[in-house]
Image (cartoon, rainbow, N blue to C red):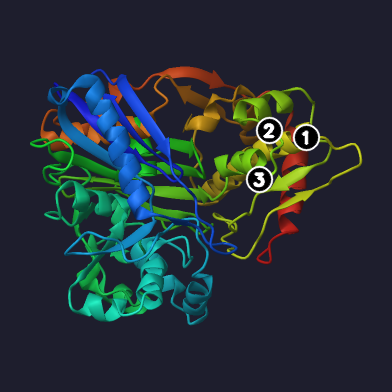
Amino acid sequence: MTTGAVLALDQGTTSSRALAVTASGEVAAMAQEAFAQIFPQSGWVEHDPEEIWRTQMATARAVIERLGAGAFSAIGLANQRETVIVWERSTGAPIHNAIVWQDRRTAPATDALARAGWGPMVAERTGLVLDPYFSASKIAFILDAVPGARQRAARGELAAGTVDCFLIWRLTGGRVHATDATNASRTSLFDIRKGVWDEELCDLFRVPLSLLPEVRDSAADYGVAEALLPGVRITGVAGDQQAALVGQACFSAGEVKSTYGTGAFLVLNTGDRLIASRSGLLSTIAYRLNGETVYALEGSILSAGSTIQWLRDNLRIIRDGAEAGEMAASIPDTGGVHLAPAFVGLGAPRWDPEARGAILGLQRGTSIAEIARAALESVAFQTAELLTAMAEDGVRPRRLKVDGGMTRNDFLMQFMADILDLEVVRPAMTETTALGAAMLASVGSGAVARLEEAASLWSAERAFHPVMASNERERRLALWSDAVRRISSRL
């Protein structure tokens, strides 16, 4: 790590955070601020880019004030992926709200491309399926929705990018329009084998190549953050799930982590081997250093922590996730209740943007406890589907490293070990996304020569081992599959 602290900016789906990560991997200071989720229509999810910027700067300044500007030697940035922003080059002002990765409004466009037979080509070049989850169709939507935007783009007046790109532009005063390879790999516009924007894909999705940023390594020079820490450079950038993979020290092929936040993301390091999934998983970039690409296989769950938020904020039947865990642990099972949380469709391996959530198996005696337990169990069941898909692709991990806010719930972690029939390991340092961003920034600043040197910063806090009988596991998985079958048109 660097001799000074790294300011790790962790821009997430529901909040912006800033953390001071020391050379020993400790968090010396942290600040967090939530921002509004905007739902203009069913299946649509937006953020106000100015709120993203305001909250990220407010949290960063709070951390800087705690330690002093002189304590920081580099900045690392991790961000929610696939979410896109289009802004004016002259002012940096967004022309439309950010369209969030969860948003499904462009399903008709991606479905039309799939029907036209473009799916295999897109998968071959990008490692991704044709789905509204990814950035390309979102950029095209903004250009079509905002009057005159396509003409302005043609004149070179606009820029587009994922959230990291927007923050870098603002931090550097518009001097740097760049993203890293991990974020580029989530757009459906980037050839992950050649490591370049693909002109044919840009034409297919109707996204002008001139809008897009330069693609750099995950540990590289992204300019001086004059708007925040004059003289301090941004030297590490990665999508939040890839940053968590780094923070979990998954540096060897075969190591896998799963992060449980708003959604949940299972990412397996496949080294220099690009595995083309046959089971609905994604091939993606884990990180790129010195021009060398490390690949990953990924499964994406669209609703995890957001399911608990829904119980809290919409139904108002729990106070928080901790209460949900207590309720779940107080009963032996859900009494046949299943909560299928397809609030914004289903992600991997089913990829059904039209599916919608349901609570199934309700009885007269069903209580809040059964619903809370069903919500938590849904996260484990969805993770099991991803690991089954990985096994079908020929990969069977020996253990699963987990992180994210939901992993503090011991009930969920034990149930997950039982349903997965796998050791589940929770790290001592739970801020793995921030730690990964700090590790990359240390490599980018030259303080650390190789990423593997930072492996000693990771250690296990607790391991959960399966105790459920195999016949009971199989029974519960079968019931879950039946529940999901009822809400999906693609099964």
Counting other residues with Cα less than 10 Å from the Cα at mark 1, is it few (<14), some (14-19), or many (20 or more)?
A: some
Element type at mark 3: helix
Residue type highlighted by circle 1: Ile
Q: CA distance from mark 1 to mark 2?
A: 8 Å
**Visible residue check, residue 252:** no
The quarter holding residue 350 reads bottom right
Q: CA distance from mark 2 to mark 3?
A: 10 Å
Residue type highlighted by circle 2: Ile
**Residue bearing mark 1:** 368
**Residue bearing mark 3:** 314
Residue located 31% across and 22% down the image: 29
Element type at mark 2: loop
Residue type highlighted by circle 3: Asn
Q: Position of residue 351 (x, y in %)?
A: 56, 61
Residue located 24% across and 37% down the image: 76
Q: Nearer the viewer, residue 2 or 138?
A: 138
Q: Position of residue 332 (x, y in %)?
A: 80, 26
The image's mark for residue 318 is: 2
Q: In the rendered view, tell whether residue 226 sits above or below residue 421.
A: below
User: Dots 1 and 2: beta carbons under 8 Å?
Assistant: yes
The image's mark for residue 229 is: none
Element type at mark 1: helix
- As drawn, the residue found furthest toward the right would be 364
